[in-house]
């Protein structure tokens, strides 16, 4: 996607991902891989702490799309899980989209989104289309 | 048993699964992902926004795949992957219709591509979701990668 004429969207903070939220998501999603729920298993796998499910972070970021485009429906949503997210990290959802000409306000809106940490390091990145 | 080649695993189809999307599960999932949008709990608001009933949060289909569908353990077993070394590297959803409470869906997961290279195995899986009328409502796609231990982590 060409990034010319992209309109930045307001960055939105994600709620901090606590260990209990990760455990609740394991329950809700059926993904009980111990690297997500057991700090010792995470250490044994070489990680400094438990890793949030990529799909939990994607799921949490979904709210940003509804905030950015009230009244529109998501029709395509993609994410690449670029880097691990650990519990208690402070994260932000950022994005930009193609501008919509005033005579085509009902057209789908295409854009890109990322989840970054406080230092701006990318954790997730992807694309979306809102109808 | 001989290890399977990448080519021989493309086209692997997992058993079709059926599930019902219900209000409580939608609410529980919205809470689990910390989504405060009342669209996921308020039927009147959902109808006002053009839905039949409360819609499922956008990533909910993946949780349905894990709980009602083949799940990671079965996928890893069929593809010869070690779950402890397998990462979910990409995910996408492409909607052809809304997914709402009350829907009865059938999911069919298959392997659409596989690549074994540089001691890494990568698989792309696709789940096609159809409704009671056999209309396609959603295609979800996942990419999984198995890294050999000691790849520098």
Image (cartoon, coloured by chain):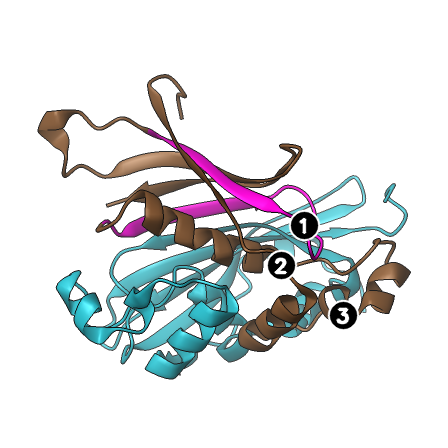
Chain colours: A brown, B cyan
First along the sequence among labels 3 and 1: 3
**Residue B53 locus on image (x, y percent):** 22, 73
Residue that appears at 67% across and 52% down: B6
Residue A87 sits in quarter: bottom right
Question: Mark 2 highlights which residue?
Answer: A17
Pointer 1 local density, CA inside 10 Å: few below 14, some 14–19, many at least 20: some
Rate crowding at label 3 as few (under 14), some (14 to 19) or many (20 or more) other CA atoms within 10 Å: some
Magenta-colored stretch includes residue B141: no
Q: Which range of residues does the magenta coloring cover?
A: A72-97
Q: Which chain carries label 3?
A: A
**Residue beneath disc 1:** A89
* A8 is higher (above) or lower (below) than A80: above
Chain identifier of the residue bearing label 2 in the image: A
Q: Which residue is drawn at 27% across and 72% down?
A: B131
Can see residue A16?
yes
Q: Classify mark 1: helix, strand or loop.
A: loop
């Amino acid at each position: 996607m060409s990034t010319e004429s992209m309109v930045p969207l307001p960055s939105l903070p994600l709620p901090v991902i606590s260990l209990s939220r990760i455990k609740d998501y394991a329950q809700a999603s059926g993904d009980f891989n111990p690297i997500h729920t057991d700090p010792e298993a995470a250490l044994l796998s070489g990680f400094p702490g438990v890793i949030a499910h990529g799909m939990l972070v994607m799921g949490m970021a979904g709210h940003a799309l509804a905030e950015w485009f009230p009244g529109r429906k998501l029709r395509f949503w993609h994410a690449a899980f670029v880097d691990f997210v650990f519990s208690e990290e402070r994260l932000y959802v950022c994005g930009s989209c193609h501008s919509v000409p005033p005579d085509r306000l009902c057209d789908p809106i295409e854009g890109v989104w990322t989840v970054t940490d406080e230092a701006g390091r990318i954790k997730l990145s992807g694309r979306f289309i809102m109808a | 048993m001989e290890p399977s080649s990448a080519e021989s695993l493309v086209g692997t189809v997992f058993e079709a699964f059926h599930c019902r999307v219900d209000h409580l599960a939608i609410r529980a999932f919205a809470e689990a992902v910390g989504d405060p949008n009342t669209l996921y709990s308020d039927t009147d608001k959902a109808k006002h926004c053009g839905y039949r009933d409360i819609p499922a949060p956008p990533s909910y289909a993946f949780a349905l795949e894990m709980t009602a569908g083949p799940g990671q353990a079965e996928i890893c077993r069929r593809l010869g992957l070690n779950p402890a070394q397998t990462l979910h590297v990409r995910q996408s959803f492409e909607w052809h219709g809304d997914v709402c409470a009350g829907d009865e869906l059938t999911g069919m997961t298959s392997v659409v591509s596989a690549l074994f290279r540089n001691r890494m195995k990568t698989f792309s899986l696709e789940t096609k979701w159809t409704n009671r009328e056999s209309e396609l409502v959603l295609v979800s796609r996942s990419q999984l990668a198995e890294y050999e231990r000691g790849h520098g982590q």
